[in-house]
C-alpha cells in the first residue's frame, strides 16, 4: 500500500504545480488587496533603499510582486523607479486599478510573468536592486536554483 500513497502524493504534487497560477488568481479574486499587509518596514530593514536620488533613478524590481505590498510602501518612501511582475493576472489587475499606481506610472510599472517558466520582463533599465519576499516558499524547491540564477543574471552588477 506504500506505493498507493506515493502515487497519490505525486498526483497531488503535479496537480498543484500545474494549477498554481489558477489557484493564486482565485485567491486574489477572493481577497483582492485585503490579505497581506503592506511591507512598511522595508526601508528600516534595508536602509540602502533610501539612497539619494540619481538621474536616471535606480530601479528596484519586486520578483513576484503580488498586489504591490512591497512596491507601494517603497513608492512613498524612496526615490527608486519600481518595477514588478507576478504570474497572477488578477494580482497585477489589482495594482493597475490602484489610484497610487495610476498617479505614479512614470515611476512604477508592473506586468504578468511566471518567474519559473517565463523570461524576466525587460525594462528600459535593468534593475539595480530587487526582492522576492515570500516568493521562494511558493515555488517548488527544484526550481530555486534556476530562478535565483535567472534573477542574478537579470540584475545589474
Image (tube, grey):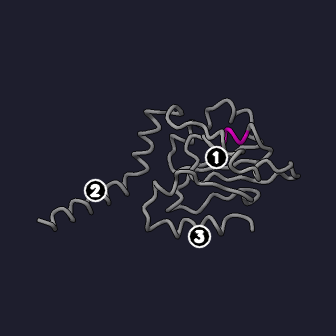
Mark 2 Cα-neighbour bin, 10 Å: few <14, some 14–19, many ≥20: few
- Is label 1 in a helix, a strand or a loop? strand
Q: Disc 3 vs disc 1: Cβ atoms closer than 8 Å?
A: no
User: Which residue is outermost to the right?
Assistant: 55
The mark nearer the N terminus, 3 or 1, is 1
User: Which residue is outermost to the front?
Assistant: 44
Q: Is residue 63 above or below residue 71?
A: below
Which residue is nearer to you in this view: 148 or 121? 148
**In this rendering, position of residue 43 left or right of residue 142:** right
Name the residue that disc number 1 marks. 110
**In this rendering, position of residue 132 left or right of residue 10:** right
Name the residue that disc number 3 marks. 149
Residues at marks 2 and 1, CA–CA distance in whole angstroms: 31 Å
Residues at marks 2 and 3, CA–CA distance in whole angstroms: 28 Å
Quarter of the image that includes the N terminus: bottom left
Residues at marks 3 and 1, CA–CA distance in whole angstroms: 21 Å
Query: Residue 41 at what x, y percent from top left?
Result: 66, 42
Mark 3 Cα-neighbour bin, 10 Å: few <14, some 14–19, many ≥20: few
The mark nearer the N terminus, 2 or 3, is 2
Span of residues in magenta: 71-75
Amino acid at each position: 500500500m506504500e506505493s498507493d500513497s506515493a502515487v497519490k502524493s505525486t498526483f497531488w504534487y503535479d496537480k498543484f504545480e500545474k494549477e498554481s497560477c489558477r489557484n493564486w488568481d482565485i485567491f486574489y479574486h477572493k481577497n483582492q488587496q485585503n490579505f497581506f499587509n503592506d511591507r512598511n518596514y522595508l526601508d528600516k530593514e534595508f536602509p540602502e533603499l533610501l539612497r539619494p536620488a540619481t538621474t536616471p533613478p535606480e530601479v528596484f524590481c519586486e520578483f513576484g510582486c503580488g498586489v504591490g505590498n512591497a512596491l507601494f510602501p517603497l513608492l512613498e518612501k524612496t526615490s527608486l523607479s519600481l518595477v514588478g511582475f507576478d504570474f497572477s493576472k488578477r494580482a497585477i489587475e489589482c495594482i493597475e486599478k490602484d489610484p497610487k499606481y495610476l498617479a505614479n506610472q512614470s515611476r512604477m510599472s508592473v506586468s504578468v510573468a511566471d518567474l519559473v517558466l517565463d523570461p524576466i520582463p525587460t525594462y528600459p533599465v535593468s534593475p539595480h536592486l530587487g526582492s522576492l519576499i515570500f516568493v521562494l516558499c511558493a515555488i517548488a524547491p527544484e526550481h530555486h536554483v534556476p530562478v535565483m540564477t535567472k534573477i542574478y543574471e537579470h540584475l545589474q552588477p
